Amino acid sequence: MLTGCTSDPGGTGPTTIATPPTPVTASATTALPTSVPPVPEGPGGEAFFVPPDPLPGVRPGDPIWTRTLDAPDGAAGAIVLYRSETLDGRAIAGSGVVLSPDGG
């Protein structure tokens, strides 16, 4: 499960855009990543939501930092701050919560 939000301090307020999930399938011609670079651990408390300036990363979805969250038994949890962009292409930070089965 992934939930997220973004804020645009220079904009008119939060915007919600609902899109259906896109299924991902792999085939013999799909190149899957063989390794994922480590993501830095973010600061504690409210400072987690204050992104560095300039924003790291290049593309929307690139992680800025993460922290482990308490999760129900059998699950692992993390909060993630990631690079996003406004509808007019300005870089902003978004945050989300990721829950997965233990080991995933």
Image (cartoon, helix red, strand yellow):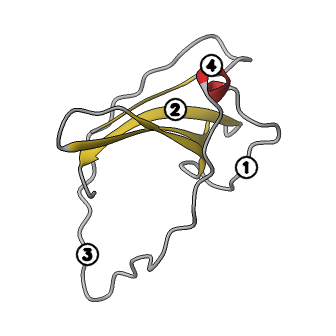
Q: Amino acid at mark 3?
A: Ala
Q: Position of residue 37 (x, y in %)?
A: 57, 67
Q: Amino acid at mark 4?
A: Glu
34 or 22: which is nearer to us?
A: 34
On screen, residue 13 above or below 3: above
Look at mark 2 in the image and give the residue it sits on.
95
Look at mark 4 in the image and give the residue it sits on.
46
Q: CA distance from mark 2 to mark 4?
A: 12 Å
Q: Could you tell which of marks 3 and 1 lies nearer the N-terminus?
A: 3
Pointers 4 and 3 in contact (CB under 8 A)? no
Q: Amino acid at mark 2?
A: Ser
* Residue 87 shows up from this direction: no
Q: Position of residue 51 (x, y in %)?
A: 71, 33
* Residue 95 shows up from this direction: yes
Residue at figure coordinates x 29%, y 33% from the top left? 71
Q: Could you tell which of marks 1 and 2 lies nearer the N-terminus?
A: 1
Res. 42 mark: none
Q: Could you tell which of marks 1 and 4 lies nearer the N-terminus?
A: 4
Q: Could you tell which of marks 4 and 3 lies nearer the N-terminus?
A: 3
Dot 1, crowdedness within 10 Å: few (<14), some or many (≥20)?
some
Q: CA distance from mark 1 to mark 4?
A: 19 Å
Instruction: Report the mark closest to the observer, 2 or 3.
Output: 2
Q: Residue furthest right?
A: 53
On screen, residue 40 above or below 93: below
Dot 4, crowdedness within 10 Å: few (<14), some or many (≥20)?
few
Res. 26 mark: 3
Q: CA distance from mark 3 to mark 1?
A: 29 Å
- Locate the N terminus and report the quarter of the image it occupies: top left
Which of the 4 image quadrants contains residue 85?
top right
**Label 4: which secondary element:** helix
Look at mark 1 in the image and give the residue it sits on.
56
